[in-house]
């Protein structure tokens, strides 16, 4: 497993994560706090994986989804004298500086960070998701942990959910995707390489052609699949509902984990089909998804 701390642009975040990890290793009970939303859960599960690998005491404290209870209406948790609080907060805007690493409360928030990319190594400014900060802490706590290794690729989906790809280009999504591929944690594949044609695809795909492809997909070879989806995607290239950067990932760089039938984007889509309006049921579902990631590394199993 190649350390995330080796990625250019994460040196400051890595130093912060080391300080936070030290406070979580003191034997106090760690309270994992966050809204029952996917991006938050993908951060919390990084921390929980490391705590389990280290055998450190902790408890979950999932709260209602931000769609149900906005941040302005949330009541801060009451901490015991022997507890330390890790709060994952997904916000639209990026923070310009690292959160405070001192005290009993640690906030994991979106962070503005610069990374150099391309042949000319030009600096690109983007936003690092809170889940990536959680993964950095997890790496310090249990660098060789089995569960840490199992859940770490899912930080890519937290970056996906940030929304930067809807506007233009997300340098940190590209950096994470390439890093995880290079270390062998996942592959980035085209639609032709997935065994199950995704249940949801962007508006603009040829509807009639997609219907034919779905019926024949399992019997088609790689060449036939590539030809078929290339024809289907042509109308979407002119459709305004999805930015070209995200469309490129959806069609040509789908993240696939070893030994799993459904790619990661499809797993999120399938999970979204079973979401619950009742906030208590939604919290229970998110807790169960954390259990699934910790034990199997998958959000959903294929039907």
Image (cartoon, rainbow, N blue to C red):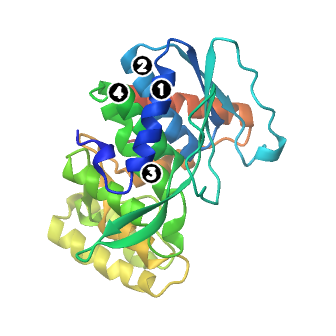
Residue labelled with disc 1:
48
Q: Which residue is mark 3?
A: 157
Position of residue 277 measured from the top left corner of the image (x, y, whole percent): 72, 43
Residue 185 visible in the picture:
yes
Residue located 48% across and 79% down the image: 204
Q: Which mark is residue 52?
A: 2
Q: Is residue 266 visible?
A: no
Mark 4: secondary structure: helix
Q: Is residue 5 above or below residue 44?
A: below
Snapshot quadrant of residue 118: bottom left
Query: Secondary structure under badge 1?
Result: helix
Please report contact status of discs 2 and 4: CB closer than 8 Å, yes or no. yes
Residue 147 is labelled as 4
Mark-to-mark CA distance, 4 and 3: 17 Å
Whole-Å distance between the Cαs marked 2 and 1? 6 Å
Q: On the rendered structure, is 22 left or right of 284?
A: left
């Amino acid at each position: 497993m190649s350390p995330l701390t080796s990625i250019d642009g994460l040196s400051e975040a890595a130093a912060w994560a080391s300080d936070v990890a030290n406070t979580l290793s003191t034997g106090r009970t760690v309270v994992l706090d966050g809204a029952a939303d996917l991006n938050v859960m993908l951060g919390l599960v990084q921390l929980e994986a490391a705590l389990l690998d280290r055998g450190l005491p902790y408890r979950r404290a999932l709260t209602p989804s931000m769609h149900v209870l906005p941040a302005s209406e949330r009541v801060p948790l009451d901490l015991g004298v022997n507890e330390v609080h890790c709060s994952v907060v997904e916000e639209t805007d990026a923070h310009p500086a690292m959160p405070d690493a001192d005290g009993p409360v640690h906030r994991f928030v979106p962070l503005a960070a610069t990374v150099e990319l391309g042949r000319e190594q030009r600096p690109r400014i983007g936003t690092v998701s809170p889940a990536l900060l959680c993964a950095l802490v997890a790496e310090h706590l249990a660098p060789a942990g089995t569960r840490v290794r199992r859940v770490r690729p899912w930080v890519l989906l937290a970056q996906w959910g940030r929304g930067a790809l809807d506007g233009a280009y997300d340098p940190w999504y590209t950096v994470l995707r390439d890093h995880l591929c290079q270390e062998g944690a996942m592959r980035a594949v085209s639609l032709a390489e997935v065994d199950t044609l995704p249940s949801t695809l962007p508006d603009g795909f040829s509807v009639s052609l997609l219907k034919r492809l779905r019926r024949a997909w399992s019997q088609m070879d790689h060449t036939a699949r590539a030809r078929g989806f290339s024809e289907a995607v042509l109308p979407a290239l002119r459709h305004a509902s999805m930015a070209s950067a995200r469309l490129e990932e959806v069609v040509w760089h789908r993240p696939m984990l070893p030994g799993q039938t459904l790619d990661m984007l499809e797993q999120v889509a399938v999970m979204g089909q079973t979401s619950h309006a009742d906030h208590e049921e939604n919290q229970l579902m998110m807790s169960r998804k954390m259990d699934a990631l910790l034990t199997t590394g998958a959000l959903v199993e294929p039907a």
